[in-house]
Structures are given as C-alpha cells and as structure tokens.
Image (cartoon, helix red, strand yellow):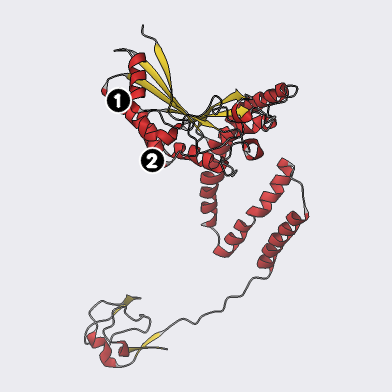
C-alpha cells in the first residue's frame, strides 16, 4: 500500500506582517519567491505514479504567492497526481477571491492567531498597527465560502494567560474545528525579546485552557436546547397563542397587554435568574406599569360620529339608475318609477352626483 508523502513548499520568505517573535528570519531571508520550475522538480521527486501526495504551503505568507499555488494545483491535476493541499496563513489576505481558489483546491487552512485583544498584540503590520481585525475578517471570509479552518497560536508570555479565551473565540467563530499551539522559540526577531512563557505558571494556564474546552463541550447540548426553546416556544408557540388571544379582545386592551412583556421580563429575570435590581430597572418598571394603569383607568372618550343619510334631490334621478342597483329592506330602485325607500342607501355607481345629497 502506497503511503502518503508530505511535501512542504516554502513559497516565499516575504510577509505582509512583522510579528515581533517571528522565527522566519533566522538564517537570513531570501528575497526571491520559489520558481514554478523548482516546485515542479520537488513534486516530481516526491510523487510516484498512482501514489498520494500531501503538499503544505508555508512562508513567509504563502498567500502572497497565490498565483504560484494555482499553477501547482493545475500541474498536479494535469499529471493525475492524487494530492491533498494545506496552507498556514496569517489570515489577513483571505478574501472572497482567495477563498474561492482555496475551495477549488480543497485546501485545508490553518490561520495563525494568538487570541483577542492584547493576547494578539505581537502580531502586527510593519507600521505597528494590529492585524487582529483583518485576520478575523479572513476567518469569516472562509465561513462565507463554506470552509472551515484551524487556529494556531504561538504560546508566549504575552498570551499564556489568555489561552482559554482562544478556545472561546474558536467556538464563537463557528467555522473553527481545531486549535493548535506552537511554543515560542527565541530565534529570529524573538531572540532577545524576552517573550518566553513563564514555565512556572504555564501548566496552570494550559490546564485552565483544557478546563475551558471541557466546559464548552459540556455546554453544547444546553446551548442547542436554549436555541430550540427560543425558536419553537418563545417565538412560534408564543406568537401563535398571542395572536389567537388578541383576536378576541379590542385593539386598545391588546396593545396594553403586549406592553407588559417588559414588565414580566424584569420580574422573571429577578425571580428565576437572580438579576440584581438597580435604580434604572426600578424606574423603567414603574414607568411602564404606571402607563398601563393610566391607560386602563383613564381611557380617552371617542367622539360619536353622526351617520350619513342620503336623500334624493329630484324625482328624475332614479330614472337614470339601472334596475336592482340598490336593494335593502325589500325595496329596489327601478327605472322610471318612484317606488324608492328612504331606508335604501345611495347606490355606489350613481351616474350623477347631483342626484344625491347628504342629510
């Protein structure tokens, strides 16, 4: 049975970031990107007819050579080489277009991210500006393309206390199916940076991370149960019953009844969830409940509007009205007769408005 061979292609040493612990500068930087012919030669050296090959793209930032990646993909496809691709990227160049290319390649994606806030403070652009927002936008672009990814963090003194937050971030993003850790190495830019993690507290930090992972896994079923409750009972069933009830009462009391939702929301949050009662909560409760009482006890009186009665102005008017246009109380308008009744309202299709007036 042919084993799958792993080929790591370092496409470039160039990078759009300047992470303060980066070890890629160790041993010098090659300013030239990998030529396509070099990649072809490496593939030919590793691949065998009928065999399997796994190609991992690294850098630098390999997405700076997205065109070269497409060339390699087309090459192995034309050669009939069964290949699985993967890439490790900082995520800032993951756009809709690049995600479409990676999806076509069925490329597994790993995004380098140390956490949120100050935990990711060492991953910056050359001008010192943070890269977190762009990296998160890249992960969301993957999600929009229907792709999942791994998060990979470098454990340093800057983020070792926030590793549990990295797990929570992965859970919130939704399309992350794994988190990897790479220990800080004091080489390259990080050689004299003093960023080595505190070995005395590191075991506790890692343990807290694992406990968070177990906690999130334990909360999984509860989370889905809560979502089901909100979707089925708190939305569909509650609104159905509410509509059925409102159909049997007048609009004014119904609107007042709906206004009590916020009142009962406060009441149940205090009774069931132990929410602390503050001044703003009390003031809001009193204002809403007071408004309901005022509306019920001092309703506005509706003015009675006199009904409109129509009377015939001249006797010739009914001559122009078609038979059986108006019928009420057994009386009908008929052509060239005067057998009309005052109980019959004005027909809707009167040919002449001058025939009728309001009484």
Q: Quadrant of the C terminus?
A: bottom left
Q: Quadrant of the N terminus?
A: top left
Q: Is residue 337 visible?
A: no
In this rendering, position of residue 326 left or right of residue 265: left
How many angstroms separate mark 2 from mark 1 (CA)?
Answer: 20 Å
Q: Which residue is mark 1?
A: 75
Q: Nearer the viewer, residue 190 or 255?
A: 190
In this rendering, position of residue 121 left or right of residue 325: right
Q: Which residue is mark 2?
A: 97
Q: Secondary structure at mark 2?
A: helix
Q: Residue at x 68, y 64 (%)?
A: 291
Q: Nearer the viewer, residue 130 or 26?
A: 26
Q: Is residue 61 visible?
A: yes
Relative to residue 262, is residue 326 depicted above or below? below
Q: Residue furthest bottom?
A: 314
Number of numbered discs: 2
Q: Residue at x 66, y 49 (%)?
A: 265
């Amino acid at each position: 049975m042919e084993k799958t061979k792993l080929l790591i292609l370092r496409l470039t040493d160039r990078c759009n970031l300047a992470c303060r612990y980066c070890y890629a500068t160790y041993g010098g930087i090659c300013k030239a990107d990998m030529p396509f012919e070099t990649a072809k030669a490496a593939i030919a050296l590793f691949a065998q007819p009928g065999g399997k090959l796994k190609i991992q793209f690294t850098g630098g930032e390999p997405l700076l050579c997205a065109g070269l990646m497409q060339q390699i993909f087309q090459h192995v496809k034309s050669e009939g080489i069964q290949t699985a691709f993967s890439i490790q990227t900082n995520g800032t160049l993951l756009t809709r277009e690049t995600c479409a290319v990676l999806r076509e390649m069925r490329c597994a994606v790993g995004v380098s991210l140390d956490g949120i806030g100050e935990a990711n403070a060492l991953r910056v652009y050359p001008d010192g500006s943070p890269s977190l927002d762009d990296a998160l936008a890249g992960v969301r672009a993957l999600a929009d393309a229907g792709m999942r990814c791994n998060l990979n963090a470098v454990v340093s003194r800057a983020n070792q206390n926030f590793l549990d937050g990295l797990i929570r971030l992965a859970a919130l993003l939704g399309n992350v199916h794994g988190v990897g850790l790479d220990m800080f190495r004091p080489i390259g830019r990080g050689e004299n940076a003093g960023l080595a993690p505190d070995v005395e507290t590191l075991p506790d930090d890692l343990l807290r991370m694992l406990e968070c992972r177990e906690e999130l896994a334990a909360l999984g079923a509860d989370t889905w149960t809560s979502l089901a409750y909100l979707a089925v009972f708190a939305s569909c069933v509650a609104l159905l019953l509410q509509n059925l009830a409102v159909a049997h009462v007048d609009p004014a009391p119904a609107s007042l009844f709906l206004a009590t939702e916020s009142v009962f929301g406060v009441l149940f949050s205090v009774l069931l969830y132990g929410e602390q009662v503050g001044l703003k909560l009390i003031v809001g409760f009193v204002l809403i409940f007071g408004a309901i009482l005022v509306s019920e006890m001092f309703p506005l009186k509706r003015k009675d509007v006199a009904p409109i009665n129509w009377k015939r102005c001249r006797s010739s008017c009914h001559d122009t009205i078609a038979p059986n246009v108006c019928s009420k109380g057994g009386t009908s308008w008929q052509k060239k007769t005067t057998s009309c009744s005052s109980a019959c309202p004005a027909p809707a299709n009167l040919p002449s408005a001058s025939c009728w007036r309001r009484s």
